[in-house]
Image (tube, grey):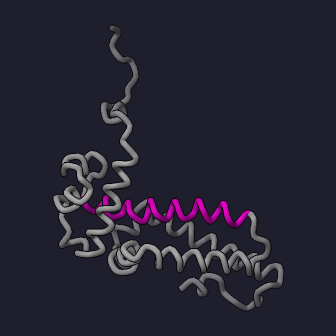
Amino acid sequence: MAPRTNNTSSKNNKAPKNPVKGAAILKAAERIFAKKGFHEATISEIARKSKVSEATIYEYFSSKEELLFSIPARTTHEYEEKNREILKYIQGASNKLRVLIYRHLSLYAENPDYANIVMLILKGHRNFQKTDAYKIVQATARKTIRVLEEGIQNGEFRSDIQPYICLL
């Protein structure tokens, strides 16, 4: 057998991770972080709840903090994909804004653990603001800003509103 000639690391040669197992870990972490908070939650509790070993969690996530930050990344990505699918069938900025507001409020109402994590744990977390997950959350907000700007341009909304302030 010929030796490898490419320069890929052994990390890149790992078998693909099981998405079902990864989702189970994230769901268990979401529940435990929401119930206990980030500092009180332990990886062993998350492992027990997700029915995997602690080592398996570290195969998927390098730290407890990365695990925490992966929750909004996954949820927001799924939410954004669905928004893109829905919004292409909606006419008018005011109707698009209604859909975005409804979906946003529904996301929190239907996922109270997720809402707890986003509103109470991550909102002021400085390290979260440096992550790709935070960029995904920001992209969602930018979509709403674009809808507001569209409504201003086409006369559906007053020209004196400031889209960035509306989102605060």
As rendered, which of 51 and 34 lies closer to the eye? 51
Q: In the rendered view of the protein, which quadrant contains the N terminus?
A: top left
Residue 47: in magenta span: no
Question: Left or right of 75: which side holds 167?
Answer: right
Q: x%, y% of residue 137?
A: 50, 68
Q: Residue at x 53, y 80 (%)?
A: 105
- Percent across and percent down for residue 66 are 31, 59
- Magenta: main secondary structure equals helix
As drawn, the residue found furthest toward the right would be 154
- Which residue is found at the position 70% from the left and 79% from the top? 148
At which x and y percent is residue 119? 39, 80
Query: What residue range appears in magenta?
Result: 64-88
Horizontal side, residue 82 vs residue 76: left or right:
right
| Residue at left offset 73%, top offset 63% | 88
Picture coordinates of residue 155 (x, y %)? 83, 84
Residue 70: within the magenta?
A: yes
Q: Which residue is at 19% across, 49% downward?
A: 53
Q: How many marks?
A: 0
